[in-house]
Amino acid sequence: MPLSSSRPSPHQPAFRRTRPDARRLALIEACARVLARAGAAGVSVRAIAVEAGVSPGLVGHYFDGIEALVAATYAHVEGAVAETLDRAVEAAGPEPRARLDAFVTTTFAPAIADPQLLATWIAFWSLVTARPAIAAQHDEQYAGSRARLEALLGDCGVPEAERRRAAIAVSALLDGLWLELCLSPGCFTAEEAGDIARRFLDGLIA
Amino acid sequence: MPLSSSRPSPHQPAFRRTRPDARRLALIEACARVLARAGAAGVSVRAIAVEAGVSPGLVGHYFDGIEALVAATYAHVEGAVAETLDRAVEAAGPEPRARLDAFVTTTFAPAIADPQLLATWIAFWSLVTARPAIAAQHDEQYAGSRARLEALLGDCGVPEAERRRAAIAVSALLDGLWLELCLSPGCFTAEEAGDIARRFLDGLIA
DNA sequence: TTGCTTGTTGGACGATCGTACAACAAAGAG
DNA sequence: CTCTTTGTTGTACGATCGTCCAACAAGCAA
Protein backbone atom coordinates (compact mmCIF):
# COMPACT_ATOMS: atom_id res chain seq x y z
CA MET A 1 0.00 0.00 0.00
CA PRO A 2 1.93 2.93 -1.30
CA LEU A 3 -0.01 5.84 0.14
CA SER A 4 -1.62 4.25 3.21
CA SER A 5 -5.27 4.99 3.75
CA SER A 6 -5.25 8.78 3.70
CA ARG A 7 -7.90 10.44 1.59
CA PRO A 8 -6.48 11.01 -1.86
CA SER A 9 -8.03 14.32 -2.75
CA PRO A 10 -7.24 16.95 -0.06
CA HIS A 11 -3.69 15.64 0.05
CA GLN A 12 -2.92 15.83 3.73
CA PRO A 13 0.88 15.91 4.17
CA ALA A 14 2.44 12.58 5.08
CA PHE A 15 5.06 14.27 7.28
CA ARG A 16 6.26 17.70 8.22
CA ARG A 17 9.69 19.13 7.75
CA THR A 18 11.26 20.61 10.84
CA ARG A 19 14.22 22.81 11.52
CA PRO A 20 17.22 20.54 12.06
CA ASP A 21 17.90 21.63 15.63
CA ALA A 22 14.24 21.17 16.60
CA ARG A 23 14.25 17.67 15.15
CA ARG A 24 17.49 16.88 16.94
CA LEU A 25 15.94 18.00 20.20
CA ALA A 26 12.82 15.92 19.56
CA LEU A 27 14.96 12.83 19.05
CA ILE A 28 16.94 13.57 22.21
CA GLU A 29 13.77 13.94 24.24
CA ALA A 30 12.37 10.74 22.75
CA CYS A 31 15.59 8.97 23.70
CA ALA A 32 15.28 10.25 27.26
CA ARG A 33 11.72 8.93 27.47
CA VAL A 34 12.70 5.51 26.14
CA LEU A 35 15.62 5.39 28.57
CA ALA A 36 13.27 6.27 31.44
CA ARG A 37 10.68 3.70 30.44
CA ALA A 38 12.74 0.75 29.21
CA GLY A 39 16.14 1.30 30.76
CA ALA A 40 19.54 1.21 29.13
CA ALA A 41 18.97 -2.24 27.63
CA GLY A 42 15.72 -1.23 25.93
CA VAL A 43 17.08 1.66 23.93
CA SER A 44 17.32 1.15 20.17
CA VAL A 45 17.04 3.08 16.95
CA ARG A 46 13.58 1.74 16.27
CA ALA A 47 12.22 2.31 19.76
CA ILE A 48 13.38 5.91 19.68
CA ALA A 49 11.94 6.43 16.20
CA VAL A 50 8.55 5.12 17.30
CA GLU A 51 8.66 7.28 20.42
CA ALA A 52 9.44 10.36 18.32
CA GLY A 53 6.81 9.46 15.71
CA VAL A 54 9.44 9.32 13.00
CA SER A 55 10.93 6.77 10.66
CA PRO A 56 13.93 4.73 11.84
CA GLY A 57 16.16 6.09 9.13
CA LEU A 58 15.94 9.59 10.53
CA VAL A 59 17.89 8.70 13.64
CA GLY A 60 20.90 7.84 11.57
CA HIS A 61 20.47 11.07 9.65
CA TYR A 62 20.97 13.20 12.76
CA PHE A 63 23.28 11.08 14.91
CA ASP A 64 26.21 8.81 14.19
CA GLY A 65 24.65 5.81 15.83
CA ILE A 66 22.95 5.17 19.13
CA GLU A 67 25.96 5.98 21.24
CA ALA A 68 26.14 9.54 19.95
CA LEU A 69 22.44 9.98 20.63
CA VAL A 70 22.82 8.65 24.17
CA ALA A 71 25.73 11.02 24.74
CA ALA A 72 23.69 13.95 23.45
CA THR A 73 20.77 12.88 25.62
CA TYR A 74 22.99 12.75 28.68
CA ALA A 75 24.29 16.24 27.93
CA HIS A 76 20.75 17.53 27.52
CA VAL A 77 19.36 15.90 30.67
CA GLU A 78 22.40 16.93 32.69
CA GLY A 79 21.86 20.47 31.44
CA ALA A 80 18.24 20.39 32.53
CA VAL A 81 19.24 19.13 35.97
CA ALA A 82 21.84 21.87 36.31
CA GLU A 83 19.24 24.44 35.30
CA THR A 84 16.80 23.14 37.91
CA LEU A 85 19.51 23.39 40.54
CA ASP A 86 20.48 26.90 39.44
CA ARG A 87 16.90 28.07 39.66
CA ALA A 88 16.54 26.62 43.14
CA VAL A 89 19.75 28.34 44.22
CA GLU A 90 18.58 31.65 42.78
CA ALA A 91 15.21 31.32 44.49
CA ALA A 92 16.93 30.83 47.82
CA GLY A 93 17.99 34.46 48.00
CA PRO A 94 21.38 36.04 48.62
CA GLU A 95 22.46 34.23 51.79
CA PRO A 96 25.34 31.90 50.72
CA ARG A 97 24.57 29.07 53.08
CA ALA A 98 20.88 29.14 52.20
CA ARG A 99 21.85 28.86 48.54
CA LEU A 100 24.07 25.88 49.24
CA ASP A 101 21.30 24.24 51.26
CA ALA A 102 18.87 24.80 48.40
CA PHE A 103 21.33 23.08 46.08
CA VAL A 104 21.44 20.08 48.39
CA THR A 105 17.71 19.88 48.99
CA THR A 106 16.88 20.12 45.32
CA THR A 107 19.39 17.40 44.48
CA PHE A 108 17.22 14.97 46.44
CA ALA A 109 13.87 16.36 45.30
CA PRO A 110 11.67 13.95 43.31
CA ALA A 111 12.39 15.70 40.02
CA ILE A 112 16.11 14.87 40.23
CA ALA A 113 16.44 11.86 42.53
CA ASP A 114 14.33 9.90 40.08
CA PRO A 115 15.03 6.24 39.30
CA GLN A 116 13.91 6.89 35.75
CA LEU A 117 16.57 9.57 35.36
CA LEU A 118 19.18 7.15 36.59
CA ALA A 119 18.75 5.09 33.43
CA THR A 120 20.20 7.95 31.37
CA TRP A 121 23.23 8.16 33.64
CA ILE A 122 23.77 4.40 33.54
CA ALA A 123 23.51 4.27 29.75
CA PHE A 124 26.07 7.06 29.56
CA TRP A 125 28.40 5.58 32.17
CA SER A 126 28.43 2.29 30.30
CA LEU A 127 30.11 4.08 27.40
CA VAL A 128 32.68 6.10 29.34
CA THR A 129 35.31 3.41 29.79
CA ALA A 130 35.45 2.23 26.20
CA ARG A 131 34.95 5.48 24.23
CA PRO A 132 37.57 8.20 24.69
CA ALA A 133 35.32 10.89 23.23
CA ILE A 134 32.62 10.09 25.76
CA ALA A 135 35.15 9.96 28.56
CA ALA A 136 36.19 13.47 27.55
CA GLN A 137 32.57 14.61 27.60
CA HIS A 138 32.16 13.14 31.06
CA ASP A 139 35.28 14.90 32.33
CA GLU A 140 34.02 18.17 30.90
CA GLN A 141 30.55 17.94 32.41
CA TYR A 142 31.92 16.78 35.75
CA ALA A 143 34.33 19.71 35.79
CA GLY A 144 31.46 22.10 35.10
CA SER A 145 29.35 20.62 37.85
CA ARG A 146 32.25 20.82 40.30
CA ALA A 147 32.99 24.42 39.32
CA ARG A 148 29.45 25.44 40.21
CA LEU A 149 29.82 23.72 43.54
CA GLU A 150 33.17 25.40 44.14
CA ALA A 151 31.58 28.80 43.61
CA LEU A 152 28.84 28.08 46.12
CA LEU A 153 31.42 26.85 48.63
CA GLY A 154 33.59 29.88 48.05
CA ASP A 155 30.66 32.17 48.82
CA CYS A 156 30.29 30.30 52.10
CA GLY A 157 33.82 31.16 53.09
CA VAL A 158 35.70 28.02 52.14
CA PRO A 159 39.25 29.21 51.41
CA GLU A 160 40.42 28.81 47.88
CA ALA A 161 43.17 26.38 48.84
CA GLU A 162 40.61 23.89 50.15
CA ARG A 163 37.89 24.58 47.62
CA ARG A 164 38.84 21.92 45.12
CA ARG A 165 38.94 19.11 47.63
CA ALA A 166 35.80 20.35 49.32
CA ALA A 167 33.93 20.37 46.02
CA ILE A 168 35.16 16.86 45.19
CA ALA A 169 34.02 15.67 48.60
CA VAL A 170 30.58 17.31 48.46
CA SER A 171 30.06 16.16 44.90
CA ALA A 172 30.95 12.58 45.82
CA LEU A 173 28.70 12.59 48.87
CA LEU A 174 25.77 13.99 46.91
CA ASP A 175 26.33 11.56 44.04
CA GLY A 176 26.58 8.60 46.38
CA LEU A 177 23.42 9.55 48.25
CA TRP A 178 21.61 10.32 45.01
CA LEU A 179 22.62 6.99 43.50
CA GLU A 180 21.49 4.97 46.50
CA LEU A 181 18.28 6.96 46.72
CA CYS A 182 17.51 6.01 43.12
CA LEU A 183 18.53 2.36 43.49
CA SER A 184 16.87 1.70 46.85
CA PRO A 185 14.21 4.36 47.38
CA GLY A 186 13.01 2.60 50.53
CA CYS A 187 16.34 2.45 52.34
CA PHE A 188 16.45 6.05 53.47
CA THR A 189 14.46 9.16 52.66
CA ALA A 190 15.29 12.28 50.71
CA GLU A 191 15.00 14.22 53.97
CA GLU A 192 17.61 11.99 55.60
CA ALA A 193 19.89 12.42 52.62
CA GLY A 194 19.51 16.19 52.87
CA ASP A 195 20.21 16.13 56.60
CA ILE A 196 23.33 14.04 56.10
CA ALA A 197 24.63 16.36 53.40
CA ARG A 198 23.85 19.52 55.35
CA ARG A 199 25.57 18.20 58.45
CA PHE A 200 28.59 17.42 56.31
CA LEU A 201 28.55 21.00 55.06
CA ASP A 202 28.39 22.25 58.65
CA GLY A 203 31.70 20.56 59.39
CA LEU A 204 33.19 21.75 56.13
CA ILE A 205 32.31 25.41 56.50
CA ALA A 206 32.76 25.97 60.23
CA MET B 1 31.62 -32.23 9.83
CA PRO B 2 30.23 -34.38 12.59
CA LEU B 3 33.31 -35.12 14.63
CA SER B 4 35.62 -32.23 13.75
CA SER B 5 39.22 -33.12 12.97
CA SER B 6 40.25 -34.95 16.13
CA ARG B 7 42.19 -38.15 15.67
CA PRO B 8 39.74 -41.02 15.68
CA SER B 9 41.75 -43.74 17.33
CA PRO B 10 43.07 -42.60 20.74
CA HIS B 11 39.71 -41.03 21.40
CA GLN B 12 40.67 -37.90 23.25
CA PRO B 13 37.60 -36.63 25.16
CA ALA B 14 35.74 -33.84 23.41
CA PHE B 15 34.79 -32.21 26.72
CA ARG B 16 35.06 -32.81 30.42
CA ARG B 17 32.25 -33.06 32.89
CA THR B 18 32.53 -30.82 35.89
CA ARG B 19 30.80 -30.59 39.21
CA PRO B 20 27.81 -28.29 38.78
CA ASP B 21 28.97 -25.64 41.26
CA ALA B 22 32.42 -25.53 39.70
CA ARG B 23 30.92 -25.03 36.25
CA ARG B 24 28.63 -22.33 37.59
CA LEU B 25 31.62 -20.54 39.05
CA ALA B 26 33.55 -20.86 35.79
CA LEU B 27 30.67 -19.24 33.92
CA ILE B 28 30.45 -16.46 36.50
CA GLU B 29 34.15 -15.74 36.22
CA ALA B 30 33.94 -15.78 32.44
CA CYS B 31 31.05 -13.30 32.64
CA ALA B 32 33.14 -11.04 34.87
CA ARG B 33 36.00 -11.11 32.36
CA VAL B 34 33.71 -10.30 29.44
CA LEU B 35 32.15 -7.48 31.42
CA ALA B 36 35.61 -6.11 32.22
CA ARG B 37 36.81 -6.35 28.64
CA ALA B 38 33.75 -5.41 26.58
CA GLY B 39 31.55 -3.53 29.02
CA ALA B 40 27.88 -3.98 29.77
CA ALA B 41 26.88 -3.69 26.11
CA GLY B 42 29.27 -6.43 24.98
CA VAL B 43 28.00 -9.16 27.25
CA SER B 44 26.10 -12.00 25.56
CA VAL B 45 25.50 -15.71 25.91
CA ARG B 46 27.88 -16.50 23.09
CA ALA B 47 30.67 -14.19 24.26
CA ILE B 48 30.54 -15.73 27.72
CA ALA B 49 30.49 -19.25 26.30
CA VAL B 50 33.57 -18.54 24.18
CA GLU B 51 35.34 -16.98 27.17
CA ALA B 52 34.56 -20.02 29.30
CA GLY B 53 35.55 -22.44 26.51
CA VAL B 54 32.11 -23.96 26.52
CA SER B 55 29.18 -24.31 24.18
CA PRO B 56 26.51 -21.57 24.14
CA GLY B 57 23.79 -23.94 25.23
CA LEU B 58 25.47 -24.54 28.56
CA VAL B 59 24.84 -21.00 29.74
CA GLY B 60 21.10 -21.55 29.53
CA HIS B 61 21.54 -24.85 31.34
CA TYR B 62 22.93 -23.15 34.45
CA PHE B 63 21.25 -19.74 34.41
CA ASP B 64 17.81 -18.48 33.49
CA GLY B 65 19.09 -16.04 30.93
CA ILE B 66 21.77 -13.40 30.87
CA GLU B 67 20.22 -11.28 33.57
CA ALA B 68 20.43 -14.04 36.14
CA LEU B 69 24.06 -14.62 35.22
CA VAL B 70 24.86 -10.92 35.54
CA ALA B 71 23.16 -10.85 38.94
CA ALA B 72 25.16 -13.89 40.06
CA THR B 73 28.32 -12.29 38.74
CA TYR B 74 27.63 -9.10 40.67
CA ALA B 75 27.07 -11.12 43.85
CA HIS B 76 30.32 -12.97 43.29
CA VAL B 77 32.41 -9.90 42.51
CA GLU B 78 30.87 -7.96 45.37
CA GLY B 79 31.71 -10.86 47.64
CA ALA B 80 35.31 -10.85 46.45
CA VAL B 81 35.54 -7.10 47.07
CA ALA B 82 34.12 -7.51 50.56
CA GLU B 83 36.61 -10.26 51.26
CA THR B 84 39.49 -8.07 50.10
CA LEU B 85 38.28 -5.31 52.40
CA ASP B 86 37.87 -7.69 55.32
CA ARG B 87 41.39 -9.02 54.89
CA ALA B 88 42.78 -5.48 54.81
CA VAL B 89 40.86 -4.60 57.97
CA GLU B 90 42.12 -7.72 59.70
CA ALA B 91 45.69 -6.99 58.65
CA ALA B 92 45.45 -3.51 60.18
CA GLY B 93 45.52 -4.88 63.72
CA PRO B 94 43.22 -4.31 66.65
CA GLU B 95 43.14 -0.49 66.76
CA PRO B 96 39.58 0.48 65.61
CA ARG B 97 40.50 3.64 63.79
CA ALA B 98 43.37 1.95 61.99
CA ARG B 99 40.95 -0.72 60.84
CA LEU B 100 38.55 1.89 59.52
CA ASP B 101 41.38 3.67 57.73
CA ALA B 102 42.46 0.40 56.15
CA PHE B 103 38.92 -0.08 54.90
CA VAL B 104 39.01 3.36 53.28
CA THR B 105 42.47 3.01 51.78
CA THR B 106 41.72 -0.40 50.30
CA THR B 107 38.49 0.89 48.77
CA PHE B 108 40.59 3.14 46.56
CA ALA B 109 43.39 0.68 45.92
CA PRO B 110 43.89 -0.36 42.28
CA ALA B 111 42.32 -3.77 42.83
CA ILE B 112 38.97 -2.25 43.76
CA ALA B 113 38.88 1.22 42.23
CA ASP B 114 39.20 -0.39 38.82
CA PRO B 115 37.33 0.93 35.78
CA GLN B 116 36.99 -2.66 34.58
CA LEU B 117 35.20 -3.61 37.77
CA LEU B 118 32.80 -0.72 37.27
CA ALA B 119 31.34 -2.48 34.24
CA THR B 120 29.96 -5.22 36.48
CA TRP B 121 28.30 -2.66 38.72
CA ILE B 122 26.83 -0.78 35.78
CA ALA B 123 25.46 -3.94 34.20
CA PHE B 124 23.85 -4.81 37.51
CA TRP B 125 22.52 -1.32 38.20
CA SER B 126 20.89 -1.26 34.79
CA LEU B 127 18.66 -4.15 35.91
CA VAL B 128 17.74 -2.86 39.38
CA THR B 129 14.94 -0.51 38.38
CA ALA B 130 13.03 -2.89 36.14
CA ARG B 131 13.47 -6.25 37.95
CA PRO B 132 12.06 -6.52 41.46
CA ALA B 133 14.10 -9.63 42.24
CA ILE B 134 17.31 -7.81 41.37
CA ALA B 135 16.23 -4.76 43.34
CA ALA B 136 15.79 -7.05 46.33
CA GLN B 137 19.26 -8.49 45.79
CA HIS B 138 20.69 -4.99 45.66
CA ASP B 139 18.93 -4.01 48.88
CA GLU B 140 20.28 -7.11 50.57
CA GLN B 141 23.87 -6.62 49.48
CA TYR B 142 23.77 -2.92 50.30
CA ALA B 143 22.42 -3.72 53.75
CA GLY B 144 25.24 -6.19 54.30
CA SER B 145 27.86 -3.70 53.19
CA ARG B 146 26.40 -1.03 55.45
CA ALA B 147 26.25 -3.42 58.40
CA ARG B 148 29.97 -4.09 58.09
CA LEU B 149 30.59 -0.35 58.04
CA GLU B 150 28.33 0.16 61.06
CA ALA B 151 30.36 -2.35 63.03
CA LEU B 152 33.63 -0.59 62.22
CA LEU B 153 32.11 2.75 63.17
CA GLY B 154 30.74 1.35 66.40
CA ASP B 155 34.19 0.11 67.35
CA CYS B 156 35.41 3.65 66.85
CA GLY B 157 32.94 4.96 69.39
CA VAL B 158 30.12 6.20 67.19
CA PRO B 159 27.01 5.91 69.40
CA GLU B 160 24.43 3.45 68.26
CA ALA B 161 21.81 6.14 67.71
CA GLU B 162 23.97 7.80 65.07
CA ARG B 163 25.45 4.66 63.59
CA ARG B 164 22.90 4.12 60.86
CA ARG B 165 23.15 7.63 59.46
CA ALA B 166 26.91 7.63 59.80
CA ALA B 167 27.17 4.41 57.85
CA ILE B 168 24.87 5.74 55.14
CA ALA B 169 26.98 8.87 54.91
CA VAL B 170 30.34 7.07 54.80
CA SER B 171 29.03 4.54 52.32
CA ALA B 172 27.72 7.28 50.03
CA LEU B 173 30.95 9.26 50.22
CA LEU B 174 33.06 6.20 49.46
CA ASP B 175 30.77 5.13 46.63
CA GLY B 176 30.76 8.60 45.10
CA LEU B 177 34.54 8.89 45.27
CA TRP B 178 34.98 5.36 43.98
CA LEU B 179 32.62 5.97 41.07
CA GLU B 180 34.33 9.18 40.00
CA LEU B 181 37.73 7.58 40.43
CA CYS B 182 36.67 4.85 38.00
CA LEU B 183 35.01 7.19 35.50
CA SER B 184 37.71 9.90 35.49
CA PRO B 185 40.90 8.37 36.81
CA GLY B 186 42.81 11.54 35.99
CA CYS B 187 40.63 13.98 37.89
CA PHE B 188 41.92 13.20 41.36
CA THR B 189 44.10 10.48 42.83
CA ALA B 190 43.36 7.54 45.07
CA GLU B 191 45.45 9.23 47.74
CA GLU B 192 43.28 12.36 47.58
CA ALA B 193 40.16 10.23 47.79
CA GLY B 194 41.56 8.50 50.87
CA ASP B 195 42.48 11.83 52.47
CA ILE B 196 39.01 13.21 51.84
CA ALA B 197 37.35 10.16 53.33
CA ARG B 198 39.63 10.03 56.36
CA ARG B 199 39.09 13.72 57.10
CA PHE B 200 35.35 13.07 56.94
CA LEU B 201 35.79 10.26 59.44
CA ASP B 202 37.74 12.62 61.72
CA GLY B 203 34.74 14.88 61.96
CA LEU B 204 32.38 11.97 62.39
CA ILE B 205 34.24 10.24 65.21
CA ALA B 206 35.57 13.19 67.22
C1' DT C 1 32.48 -55.15 30.26
C1' DT C 2 27.40 -53.09 29.84
C1' DG C 3 23.87 -49.87 30.83
C1' DC C 4 22.17 -45.60 32.74
C1' DT C 5 22.30 -40.86 34.01
C1' DT C 6 22.90 -36.37 32.69
C1' DG C 7 26.33 -32.80 31.64
C1' DT C 8 27.32 -31.05 27.21
C1' DT C 9 27.20 -30.08 22.44
C1' DG C 10 26.00 -27.57 18.30
C1' DG C 11 22.92 -25.95 15.25
C1' DA C 12 18.14 -24.32 14.04
C1' DC C 13 14.85 -20.86 14.86
C1' DG C 14 12.54 -16.37 14.94
C1' DA C 15 13.22 -11.82 16.64
C1' DT C 16 15.68 -7.73 16.72
C1' DC C 17 19.60 -5.18 16.14
C1' DG C 18 22.29 -0.97 13.40
C1' DT C 19 23.19 0.55 8.92
C1' DA C 20 22.64 1.91 4.20
C1' DC C 21 20.29 3.58 0.37
C1' DA C 22 17.10 4.67 -3.45
C1' DA C 23 12.80 6.92 -3.87
C1' DC C 24 9.54 10.27 -2.40
C1' DA C 25 7.74 14.75 -1.16
C1' DA C 26 7.57 19.16 1.58
C1' DA C 27 9.07 23.75 1.51
C1' DG C 28 11.18 27.60 -0.42
C1' DA C 29 13.31 30.08 -4.48
C1' DG C 30 12.65 31.90 -8.82
C1' DC D 1 3.46 28.13 -11.76
C1' DT D 2 8.10 25.13 -12.03
C1' DC D 3 12.41 23.82 -10.32
C1' DT D 4 15.65 22.71 -6.79
C1' DT D 5 16.94 21.31 -2.39
C1' DT D 6 17.04 18.10 1.12
C1' DG D 7 14.42 16.41 5.08
C1' DT D 8 12.10 12.11 5.38
C1' DT D 9 10.45 7.64 4.40
C1' DG D 10 10.45 2.65 4.17
C1' DT D 11 12.67 -1.29 3.34
C1' DA D 12 16.30 -4.60 2.50
C1' DC D 13 20.42 -6.44 4.25
C1' DG D 14 23.68 -9.00 7.11
C1' DA D 15 24.93 -9.66 11.77
C1' DT D 16 23.85 -10.96 16.24
C1' DC D 17 20.80 -11.68 19.75
C1' DG D 18 18.41 -15.35 23.37
C1' DT D 19 16.14 -19.54 23.41
C1' DC D 20 15.31 -24.18 22.47
C1' DC D 21 16.09 -29.11 21.88
C1' DA D 22 17.42 -33.59 19.92
C1' DA D 23 21.59 -36.06 19.83
C1' DC D 24 25.91 -37.24 21.76
C1' DA D 25 29.19 -38.88 25.16
C1' DA D 26 31.64 -38.71 29.77
C1' DG D 27 31.55 -40.80 34.01
C1' DC D 28 29.68 -43.79 37.33
C1' DA D 29 27.26 -48.01 38.97
C1' DA D 30 26.74 -52.71 38.58
Image (cartoon, coloured by chain):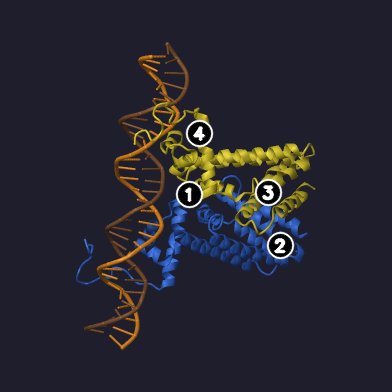
Chain colours: A yellow, B blue, C brown, D orange
Host chain of mark 3 = A
> Eyeballing the image, is A4 above or below A37?
above
Q: Position of residue A202 (x, y in %)?
A: 78, 49
CA distance for labels 4 and 2? 46 Å
Which chain's residue wears label 4? A
What residue would you read off at disc 3? A108
> Are discs 2 and 1 located on one and the same chain?
no
* Relative horizontal placement of residue B198, taking residue A183 as reference (left or right): right
* Other-residue count near label 2 (Cα within 10 Å), few / some / many at <14 / 14–19 / ≥20: some
- Nearer the observer: mark 4 or 2; the answer is 4
Is there one chain holding both mark 2 and mark 3?
A: no
Q: Which residue is drawn at 76% across and 64% down?
A: B161
The residue positioned 69% from the left and 40% from the top of the image is A150
Q: What residue type is labelled 2?
A: Arg
* Residue A72 shows in the view: no
Q: Which amino acid type corresponds to the residue marked 3 in the rendered image?
A: Phe
CA distance for labels 2 and 1: 36 Å
Q: Is residue B25 visible?
A: yes
Alpha carbon distance from label 4 to label 1? 20 Å
Residue located at (28% from left, 68% from top) = B14
Q: Residues within 10 Å of mark 4 (few under 14, many from 20)?
A: some
Badge 1 amino acid: Gly
Residue picked out by circle 4 = A24
Tag 1 residue = A42
